[in-house]
């Protein structure tokens, strides 16, 4: 991919909304990742601080059944460290719901030391009880994760360089395939996919037979058959023409919902600290047996309404669109594109 194609120099962003949309109260510093429980309660990773940013890191909830109400702060019990959350994934076993959170080290720490924290969701859905912290030498610059068993998960490294200088160079030369995917078996991590282009969002199919990975700087999403925990077989790749972030999977249809930046130039300028407004896009992608089918744009704007969409999650006839450090948008799904069979 050429630099001009990556930057989308002449790309025009058109407005596209699926129905009435309203901002969710109480979220002002982004909801970079979202996980939805079967009940319609969404858990939000909010306020992640980056170099030069002023967030308010927290984990929150939003209830799809009462969209007019503000997002609520989740009270953390037993957690003693500094919270700076990024990707999240939920896992339910024996009636207990666990929330796994990618937690970034403070910006001042060098080399960085990202962890994954395991919390137990309280029965009243009002708080989280910290249970365990996972560290590993392969946790280099974590972004997202998907839990496939208790304390077993795949996670993406969006950065692999450890010194501050090299990490800044890695950001500048993000089109070099240095990133990877790690499988953690509960005790240690193993790189299962290497040489990826900006490993970002990751998820698995409802039957856990296929893994999906978004590669931001290649503007593509790829699928892999999970032959075994440590063996992933490439199945398909789909070029999106936008920079994909988190990948959510519809539990009923298996469709993928992807938050994306439709402008590489705006996204890149934001990462480097030169721009505050990034166009937003939400895509729905059909998939069957690991093979990608059609795709539809569900939401789009030039960033003047919603800046920097990083995740989109559906629940019944509505969606939530989260951002890296802007707001959280709730939309009803009334458009043809939302109902189109892909």
Image (tube, helix red, strand yellow):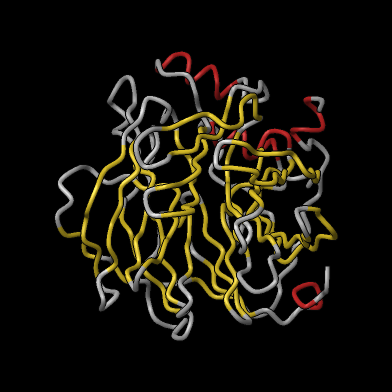
Q: Residue at x 36, y 48 (%)?
A: 85
Residue sitting at x 25%, y 71%: 122
- Left or right position of 299 against 136: right
Q: Is residue 83 left or right of residue 2?
A: left
Horizontal side of residue 131 vs 134, given as left or right: left
Q: In which quadrant of the rendered view does residue 163 lie?
A: top left
| Quadrant occupied by the C terminus | bottom right
Pick the front one: 278 or 246: 246
Rendered-image quadrant of the N terminus: top right
User: In this rendering, is residue 80 above or below 109?
Assistant: below
What residue do we see at 69% from left, 59% from top? 301
Image coordinates of residue 123 in percent, x first then y, are 26, 76
Residue 89, position in %: x, y?
45, 56
Q: Nearer the viewer, residue 168 or 193?
A: 193
Q: Does 275 sit left or right of 294 as displayed?
A: left
Give the percent coordinates (x, y) of residue 164.
40, 18
Q: Which of 60 and 172 is in front in this view?
A: 60
Q: In this picture, is 220 found above or below 16? A: above
Residue 314 position, x and y percent, is: 60, 71
């Amino acid at each position: 991919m050429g630099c001009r194609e990556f930057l989308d120099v002449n790309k025009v962003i058109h407005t596209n909304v699926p129905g009435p949309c309203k901002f969710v109260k109480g979220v002002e510093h982004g909801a970079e990742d979202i996980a939805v429980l079967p009940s319609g309660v969404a858990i939000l990773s909010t306020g992640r601080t980056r170099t030069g940013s002023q967030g308010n890191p927290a984990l929150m909830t939003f209830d799809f059944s009462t969209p007019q109400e503000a997002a609520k702060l989740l009270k953390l019990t037993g957690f003693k460290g500094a919270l700076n959350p990024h990707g999240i994934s939920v896992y339910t076993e024996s009636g207990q719901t666990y929330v796994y959170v990618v937690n970034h080290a403070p910006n001042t720490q060098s080399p960085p030391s990202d962890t994954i924290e395991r919390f137990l969701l309280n029965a009243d859905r009002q708080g989280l009880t910290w249970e365990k912290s996972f560290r590993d030498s392969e946790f280099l610059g974590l972004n997202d994760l998907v839990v496939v068993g208790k304390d077993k998960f795949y996670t993406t490294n969006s950065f692999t360089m450890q010194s501050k200088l090299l990490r800044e160079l890695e950001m500048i030369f993000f089109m070099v395939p240095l990133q990877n995917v790690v499988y953690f078996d509960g005790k240690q991590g193993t790189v299962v996919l290497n040489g990826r282009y900006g490993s970002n969002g990751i998820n698995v199919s409802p039957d856990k037979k296929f893994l999906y990975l978004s590669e931001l700087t290649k503007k593509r999403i790829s699928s892999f058959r999970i032959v075994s925990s440590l063996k992933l077989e490439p199945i398909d790749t789909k070029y999106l023409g936008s920079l994909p972030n988190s990948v959510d999977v519809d539990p009923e249809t298996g469709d993928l919902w992807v938050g994306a930046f439709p402008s590489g130039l705006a996204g890149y300028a934001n990462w480097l600290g030169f721009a505050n407004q990034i166009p937003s896009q939400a895509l729905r992608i059909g998939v069957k047996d690991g093979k990608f089918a059609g795709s539809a744009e569900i939401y789009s704007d030039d960033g003047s309404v919603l800046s920097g969409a990083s995740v989109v999650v559906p629940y019944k006839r509505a969606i939530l669109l989260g951002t890296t450090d802007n707001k959280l948008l709730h939309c009803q799904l009334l458009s043809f594109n939302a109902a189109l069979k892909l």
